[in-house]
Amino acid sequence: MSQPILQVDQLVKRFGGLVATDHCNLEIRAGEVHALIGPNGAGKTTLLAQLSGELASDSGRILFEGRDITRLPIHKRVAEGIVRSFQITTLLPRLTVRENLALAVQARTGHSFDFLGTVADESDLDEGAEEAARRVGLLDLMEHIVGTLSHGRQRALELGMALACKPRLLLLDEPMAGTDPEESKKMGDLINSLREEHTLILVEHDMDAVFRLADRVSVLVAGHVIASGQPDEIRNDPQVIAAYLGEDETATENMQ
Ligand SMILES: Nc1ncnc2c1ncn2[C@@H]1O[C@H](COP(=O)(O)OP(=O)(O)OP(=O)(O)O)[C@@H](O)[C@H]1O
């Protein structure tokens, strides 16, 4: 767990006069769960969107395993192994769990949904869909219509769809948002179970989950990383405490 899988170097994103990502530096090590925290409006979602390719960067560089991916479009980053989940809902609520997962596998493999296609193609899709469903505990709900599932199960399916893309670096954008305590615990266990096979960047407001799951934490304030380190170092960093106290007292309390 030492080689950087991702390096962000002096990255910038402007929205008109606002500098949302301000010469941001960040290093993610292979195999770690790296949480990205910070006050509202700090630029966490913007940075994730720059990493996934949804937003173009104005300057700076993103290196994935040493390769410059700053200008690559989303689908090429997915092919490289960088996939973002949550925040943007990708589910098709009128289709079944199986159909949703098959679409995600299709997006990764480039299969077309040609119903006259070879049986091998269809069984590949089905195999990929079942593997992803097993991973997120939805195997017994494969034929259920997605719109009828609970919020927690839908979130698990979103994660399954990201996993169906076989990510090496998975960007999780507020996976606990809108979940009740029981669903949140399940999601935490699920994320924990992914650490063996994936590197994870976790953006999450639930500080309890962050400090339970993260190997390292980076703190973003005004588009800039002000501290990176192990959870205990971050918890006790005066600069971090000051940044949170200025904006969000409950976050600081939850970190203790
Ligand atoms: N598309 C956009 N156009 C203009 N300004 C934007 C856009 N997206 C984000 N911003 C601004 O960029 C800044 C960073 O926003 P961002 O959503 O990335 O922060 P965040 O840390 O994810 O916040 P939160 O924790 O509330 O989700 C904010 O000032 C926001 O208003």
Image (cartoon, rainbow, N blue to C red):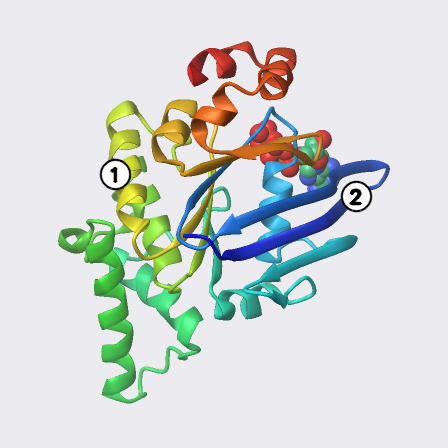
Element class at badge 1: helix
Residue in the foreground of this view, choosing between 213 and 132 = 213
Residue 7: which numbered mark, if any? Answer: none
* Image quadrant, ligand 1: top right
Estimate the x, y position of residue 89 in percent, counting from the top left. Answer: 46, 47
Image quarter in which the C terminus is found: top left
Q: Is residue 168 above or below residue 252?
A: below
Judge whether residue 178 can be spotted in this image: no
Q: Is mark 2 within 8 Å of ligand 1?
A: no
Q: Is residue 67 above or below residue 31?
A: below
Q: Is residue 41 above or below residue 24?
A: above
Give the residue at x 71% y 30%: 222
Estimate the x, y position of residue 156 in percent, counting from the top left. Answer: 30, 45
Q: Say if mark 1 contacts mark 2, CB within 8 Å.
A: no
Residue with the mark numbered 2: 14
Crowding near pointer 1: few (<14 within 10 Å), some, many (20+)?
few
Circle count: 2
**Residue furthest left as drawn:** 140
**At label 2, which amino acid type do we have?**
Arg
Residue with the mark numbered 1: 189
Q: Is residue 196 above or below residue 184?
A: below
Give the residue at x 57% y 48%: 27
Answer with the quarter of the image where residue 37 lies.
top right
Answer with the quarter of the image where residue 41 lies.
top right
**At label 1, which amino acid type do we have?**
Asp
Estimate the x, y position of residue 246 in percent, counting from the top left. Answer: 65, 12
Element class at badge 2: strand
- Left/right of residue 104 with respect to residue 139 in the rendered view: right
Give the residue at x 39% y 28%: 211
Judge whether residue 170 can be spotted in this image: yes
